[in-house]
């Protein structure tokens, strides 16, 4: 294969498909990247695969998790499955066996190959689709639309949403009215009046509206609170646009769409389908880890408040929970943990799950019923600041 | 377009140039750096504190023989202190002085907003150099998102609009190195604009090579033992793992205390010098004389 800028058609297609393959594996690459891959490949040459690997790694990775998974994915995509061992031995050595163009053409014809070839790389989990067969113990979602409580909840959530629109930061920005005089701004404005400061500029604290991600524990121990919180989440979804909901028990399911459905009956139906495993055990740590891997990149940014509603009874490893929360804490603005049972007499956060979580959360709030939520609402607003 | 062999040679040459200015880089890192200088794309470096991210920019500037312009980010950094600012005091003074002369208002204004009253901050300075400088945007994760958005505009077009003067386009495209310690997640848009390198803690061989270049007086056996001890330390469950800077500090401290070899009998000197290596109280409590003695004996 002569190393020329006009790479052969099949090779071009193979290279161009790589960014799509990474995207399918959760990388934050976009449409323009496949042409950049070709540009880099023609710049670097393809005769020395390690050079190609390092260059593409620099080009296509964007965060540590991607960086650490890249090599396995590169092997899986560009090498036939049984040649993996060869690569691992070859770090900076030249004994590396390059994939010949004909091989890459061959493997291009087998679309199923990449995933199998990923070898020791931790596979993305199978997606659990909701199915009627699985929901053996599904909940009775007619509760979701009980009229008398719904009205109260809606009123409260409207208040929360309204207050959240006014969350102010410590940081200041120029504004038309405010609390501090802004000399540079005023001088800047005075220029248009020939140096006479007719309009005065002030500085005031910036306002932001946080994004909210709700992670709701629906395991058996939480069963008497789950509906209440679902109603809360549904009412809040109606008020705010930037809110995402997830339920978890032994695994995690996104429910944003079902929550936002304007038709209460259809929302119930959707929830019903999603509720497989409802009321089972809890693996908080594993679910949070799954959340971090599958949803964090898209759903959590630095203005995000993550609200976890759980009693903290975790059947998994506490260390998994602590690690997942630490990772989440680094990216999210705040983590608020609402524990419905913490108002019970004699309760203290002694369960292994709560112990592991405590160092990483910003606010631990009680919340057994609407009255309690009302009481802690100011704290929650305050901690969003 | 280069052939495979040519490319390998290019990367090896860059590796050697970097070593000549005191920066030890792996082959893969040099390959990424070479690509960055060719594509003129910014390079985003992530990794724990103290793995030598900032040094990359310094080494690159030394290799290319250009200026290093550094922008240290901090919470509350706004576009003005990073890009440009008008010298308000001088402008005010000028307004007062110009009150007497009889030029037109437009002419006066033009004078007040001329480059004489413009204070160039790092970003503007970087794009107005005639020879491509190295622009180091250090710890970008400390700045807030608004600033990140400004940065995006600059990094994609290398031009800046100053309302009073018009658009300033880069005279030469700077080599941009962005570092982040991961205290805040950066926006995907910024990540996508940049080439990426994750800098790991150095391997034993790499750290030894760094120590030999940076602290030649600790040559030979002591250097090997120091690196072994530090590498063992990093494997412990610490809040803050020591970086390369700590290794160098600690080596200097040991030399100052007259330690020539790390072993059971040097435990006391090691305990005294741990302040250079261990930087939090919780971590310090993990280093009892027994632990240190055992680790030293193992070196």
Image (cartoon, rainbow, N blue to C red):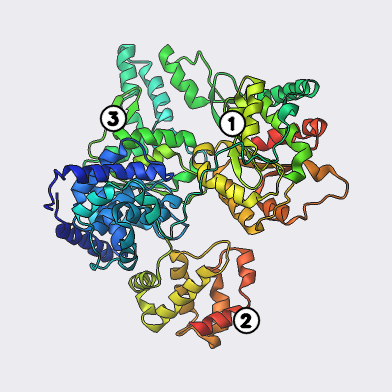
Q: Quadrant of residue B11?
A: bottom left
Measure the alpha-carbon separation of dots 3 and 1.
45 Å
Looking at the rendered structure, which numbered label has been put on residue A143? Answer: none
Name the residue that disc number 1 marks: A256
Q: Who comes first in sequence, dot 2 or dot 3? A: 3
Q: Quadrant of residue B62?
A: bottom left
Name the residue that disc number 2 marks: B290
Give the x, y percent position of residue A301: 52, 38
Measure the alpha-carbon separation of dots 2 and 3.
63 Å
A84 to the left or right of A222? left
Give the x, y percent position of residue A200: 53, 18
Name the residue that disc number 3 marks: B168
User: Which residue occupies the foreground of this view, B103 or A89?
Assistant: A89
- Which chain letter goes with mark 2? B
Mark 3, mark 1: which one is toward the viewer?
A: 1
Most distant residue in the front direction: A133
Mark 2, mark 3: which one is toward the viewer?
A: 2
Please, what secondary structure does the residue beneath circle 1 have? helix
């Amino acid at each position: 294969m002569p190393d020329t800028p006009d790479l052969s058609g099949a090779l071009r297609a193979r290279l161009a498909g790589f960014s799509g393959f990474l995207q399918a594996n959760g990388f934050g690459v976009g449409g323009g990247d496949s042409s950049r891959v070709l540009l880099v490949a023609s710049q670097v040459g393809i005769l020395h695969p390690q050079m190609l690997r390092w260059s593409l790694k620099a080009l296509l990775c964007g965060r540590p998790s991607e960086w650490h998974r890249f090599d396995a994915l590169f092997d899986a995509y560009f090498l036939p499955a049984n040649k993996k061992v060869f690569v691992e031995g070859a770090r900076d050595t030249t004994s590396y066996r390059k994939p010949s163009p004909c091989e890459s053409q061959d493997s291009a014809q087998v679309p199923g190959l990449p995933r199998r070839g990923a070898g020791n790389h931790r596979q993305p989990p199978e997606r659990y689709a909701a199915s009627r067969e699985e929901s053996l113990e599904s909940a009775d979602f007619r509760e979701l639309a009980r009229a008398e409580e719904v009205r109260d909840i809606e009123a409260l959530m409207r208040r929360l949403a309204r207050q959240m629109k006014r969350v102010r930061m410590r940081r200041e920005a120029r504004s038309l009215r405010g609390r501090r005089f802004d000399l540079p701004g005023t001088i800047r404005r005075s220029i248009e009046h020939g140096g006479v400061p007719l309009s005065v500029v002030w500085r005031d604290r910036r306002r932001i509206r946080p994004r909210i991600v709700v992670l709701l524990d629906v395991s058996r121990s939480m069963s008497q609170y789950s509906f209440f919180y679902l109603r809360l989440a549904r009412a809040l979804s109606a008020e705010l646009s930037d809110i995402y909901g997830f339920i978890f028990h032994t695994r995690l399911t996104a429910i944003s769409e079902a929550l936002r459905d304007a038709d209460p009956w259809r929302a119930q139906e959707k929830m019903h389908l999603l509720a497989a495993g409802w009321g089972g055990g809890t693996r908080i740590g594993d679910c949070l880890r799954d959340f971090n891997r599958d949803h964090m990149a898209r759903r959590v940014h630095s203005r995000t408040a993550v609200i976890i509603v759980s009693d903290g009874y975790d059947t998994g490893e506490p260390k998994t929970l602590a690690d997942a929360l630490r990772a989440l804490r680094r990216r999210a603005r705040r983590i608020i943990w609402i524990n419905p049972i913490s108002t019970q007499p004699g309760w203290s956060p002694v369960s292994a799950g709560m112990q592991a979580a405590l160092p990483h959360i910003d606010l631990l709030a009680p919340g057994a019923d609407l009255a309690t939520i009302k009481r802690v609402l100011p704290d929650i607003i305050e901690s969003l600041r | 377009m280069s052939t495979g062999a040519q490319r390998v040679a290019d990367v090896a040459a860059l590796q050697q140039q970097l070593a000549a200015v005191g920066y030890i880089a792996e082959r893969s890192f040099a390959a990424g750096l070479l690509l960055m200088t060719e594509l003129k794309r910014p390079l985003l470096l992530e990794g724990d504190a103290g793995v030598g991210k900032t040094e990359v920019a310094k080494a690159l500037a030394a290799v290319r023989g250009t200026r290093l312009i550094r922008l240290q980010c901090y919470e509350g950094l706004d576009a003005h202190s990073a890009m440009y600012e008008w010298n308000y005091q001088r402008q005010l003074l000028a307004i007062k002085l110009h009150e007497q002369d009889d030029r037109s208002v437009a002419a006066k204004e033009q004078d007040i907003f001329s480059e004489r009253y413009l204070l160039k901050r790092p970003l503007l300075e970087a794009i107005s150099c005639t020879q491509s400088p190295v622009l180091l945007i250090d710890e970008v994760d400390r700045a807030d998102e608004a600033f990140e958005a400004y940065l995006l505009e600059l990094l994609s077009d290398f031009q800046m609009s100053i309302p009073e003067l018009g658009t300033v386009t880069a005279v030469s495209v700077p080599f941009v190195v962005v570092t982040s310690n991961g205290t805040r997640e950066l926006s995907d848009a910024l990540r996508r604009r940049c080439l990426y390198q994750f800098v790991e803690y150095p391997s034993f061989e790499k750290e030894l090579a760094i120590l030999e270049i940076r602290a030649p007086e600790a040559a030979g056996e002591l250097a090997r033992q120091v690196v072994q001890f530090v590498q063992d330390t990093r494997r412990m469950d610490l809040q803050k793992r020591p970086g390369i800077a700590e290794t160098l500090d600690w080596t200097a401290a040991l030399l100052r205390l007259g330690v020539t070899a790390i072993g059971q009998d040097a435990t006391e000197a090691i305990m005294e010098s741990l302040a250079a290596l261990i930087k939090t109280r919780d971590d310090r409590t993990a280093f009892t004389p027994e632990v240190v003695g055992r680790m030293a004996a193992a070196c």
